[in-house]
């Protein structure tokens, strides 16, 4: 077994800690370059091209920079919705520019508005710390996306991740919802 596989195996907590450390150690310029490749690859996929509505999280730290694809979506005339947390639940609220955001829960930018809309169809970006080739996912531990998607099964989901976030295997639980596709700088996993 390679040392990479050793780093990428273990319990969800162990994998989460290891992959976060690897991602957080990445050079900012490298993150920016890789984010551009991921967003370009995503923007060429039919799941993006055919979506009228985009549900995107606001990236933080060394996560794949969603600002690039959000700006692309606005330029392409798509509606962009971002999450706002209400206790243990989250809702998506449409924004037309970044001025409509303010720091919210967990220090993440959220819409200032509480004007919720029911999104009937679209493409949702699912954040995560690690993923495997079967599209199992380790999130940040709050279960917000799993709970939201349980009620909104009709949304197509895409995870945006660096290649270093793809691990050998993740034990998934019954309540875990897998993204339909994972987009990295080198491939699309579906």
Image (spheres, rainbow, N blue to C red):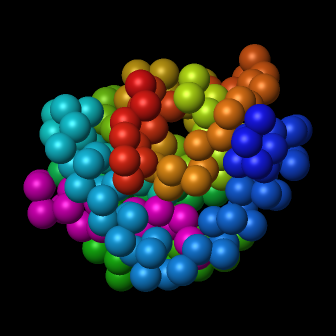
Give the quadrant of residue 168. Answer: top right
Give the quadrant of residue 36. Answer: bottom left
Q: Residue furthest front?
A: 1
Left or right? Give the position of 63 relative to 53: right
140 vs 32: above or below: above
Q: Position of residue 144 (x, y in %)?
A: 67, 44
> Which quadrant, please, contains the N terminus?
top right
Left or right? Give the position of 162 relative to 172: left
Kindly identify the residue that appears in the image at 82 percent across and 58 percent down.
Answer: 17
Asked whether 150 or 135 is in front, the reply is: 135
Residue 67 part of the magenta-drawn span: yes
Asked whether 168 or 89 is in front, the reply is: 168
131 vs 104: above or below: above
Residue 148 part of the magenta-drawn span: no
Instruction: Judge whether residue 112 can be spotted in this image.
Output: no
163 vs 149: above or below: below
- Looking at the rendering, the stretch of residues picked out in magenta corresponds to 58-77
Q: Position of residue 181 (x, y in %)?
A: 42, 32
């Amino acid at each position: 077994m390679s040392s990479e596989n050793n780093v990428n195996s273990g319990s969800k907590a162990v994998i989460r800690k290891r992959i976060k450390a690897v991602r957080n150690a990445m050079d900012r310029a490298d993150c920016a370059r890789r984010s551009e490749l991921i967003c370009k690859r995503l923007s060429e996929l039919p799941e993006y091209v055919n979506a009228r509505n985009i549900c995107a999280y606001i990236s933080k730290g060394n996560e794949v920079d969603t600002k690039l694809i959000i700006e692309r979506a606005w330029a392409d005339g798509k509606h962009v919705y971002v999450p706002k947390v209400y206790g243990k639940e989250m809702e998506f609220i449409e924004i037309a520019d970044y001025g409509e955001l303010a720091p919210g829960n967990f220090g993440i930018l959220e819409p200032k508005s509480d004007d919720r809309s029911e999104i009937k169809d679209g493409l949702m970006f699912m954040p995560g710390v690690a993923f495997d080739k079967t599209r199992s996912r380790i999130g940040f531990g709050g279960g917000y996306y799993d709970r939201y998607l349980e009620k909104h099964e009709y949304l197509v989901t895409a995870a945006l991740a660096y290649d270093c976030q793809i691990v050998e295997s993740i034990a998934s639980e019954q309540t875990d919802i897998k993204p339909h596709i994972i987009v990295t700088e080198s491939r699309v996993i579906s």
